[in-house]
Image (spheres, grey):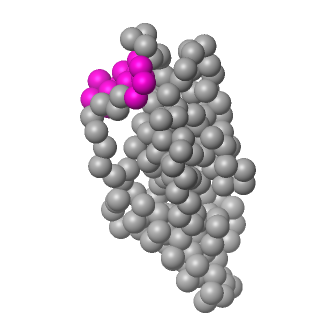
């Protein structure tokens, strides 16, 4: 899909809401600086590139130490017992598993799991991570850990990879 940037003199809140609700990716009102306009265009293009890249190549089934995540059937099991995850919890865990040891910013996770049309608070990622952790806390010897990287986001560490160093995060939109 083609990104849309609305550039207008109409600055009323209702105009902005209408513009964004009919599909605009951003809304800029006059007067604006060339620097701001270029930054907004760069941000839109970055989001488009992320959404087109997708989560990358992933195995249909991830298995580590008694844990399995089947992307085809959307079933998660721990030691043979099914763990029921909500759709976004499943997608978030699946994305983190596909990118182990890589720090993922909240913005990148929102883009990958909720998509470019997400309208809400970035803290929704924190809530979903908490719910995932709660669903696995009753199991002994969990083969992975979702680590909070303060001020940035999250990293999934496979405990079998504990000796390997984490890979730094790529810059996120709000890191620029």
Whether residue 13 is in magenta: the answer is no
Whether residue 69 is in magenta: the answer is yes
Give the quarter of the image for residue 7: bottom right
Q: Nearer the viewer, residue 43 or 89?
A: 89
Relative to 64, say whether 98 is above or below. Answer: below
Q: Nearer the viewer, residue 168 or 52?
A: 168
Q: Nearer the viewer, residue 60 or 13?
A: 60
- Residue 117 visible here: no
What segment is highlighted magenta in the picture?
Answer: 64-77
For the N terminus, the quadrant is bottom left
- Return the x and y of residue 121 as percentages of the image width and height: 66, 46
Relative to 125, say whether 14 is above or below. Answer: below
Residue at x 41%, y 20% (from the top left corner) = 66
Relative to 128, say whether 122 is above or below. Answer: below
Residue at x 29%, y 24% (from the top left corner) = 73
Left/right placement of residue 152 relative to residue 2 reads right
- Return the x and y of residue 27 as percentages of the image width and height: 58, 69
- Residue 59 visible here: yes
Count of residue discs: 0
Q: Nearer the viewer, residue 115 or 109?
A: 109
Furthest-bottom residue in this view: 34
Furthest-top residue in this view: 81
For the C terminus, the quadrant is bottom right
């Amino acid at each position: 899909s083609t990104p849309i940037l609305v550039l207008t003199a109409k600055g009323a809140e209702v105009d902005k809401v209408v513009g964004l609700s009919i599909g605009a990716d951003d809304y800029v009102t006059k007067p604006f600086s060339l620097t701001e306009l270029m930054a907004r265009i760069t941000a839109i293009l970055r989001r488009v590139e992320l959404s087109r890249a997708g989560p990358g190549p992933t195995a249909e089934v991830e298995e580590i130490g008694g844990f399995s995540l089947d992307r085809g059937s959307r079933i998660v099991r721990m030691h043979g017992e099914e763990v029921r995850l909500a759709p976004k919890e499943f997608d978030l865990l699946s994305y983190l598993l596909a990118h182990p040891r890589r720090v993922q910013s909240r913005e990148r996770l929102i883009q990958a799991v909720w998509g470019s049309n997400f309208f809400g608070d970035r803290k929704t990622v924190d809530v979903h991570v908490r719910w995932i952790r709660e669903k696995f806390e009753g199991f002994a010897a969990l083969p992975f850990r979702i680590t909070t990287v303060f001020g940035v986001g999250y990293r999934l560490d496979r405990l079998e990879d504990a000796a390997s160093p984490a890979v730094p995060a790529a810059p996120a939109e709000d890191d620029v």
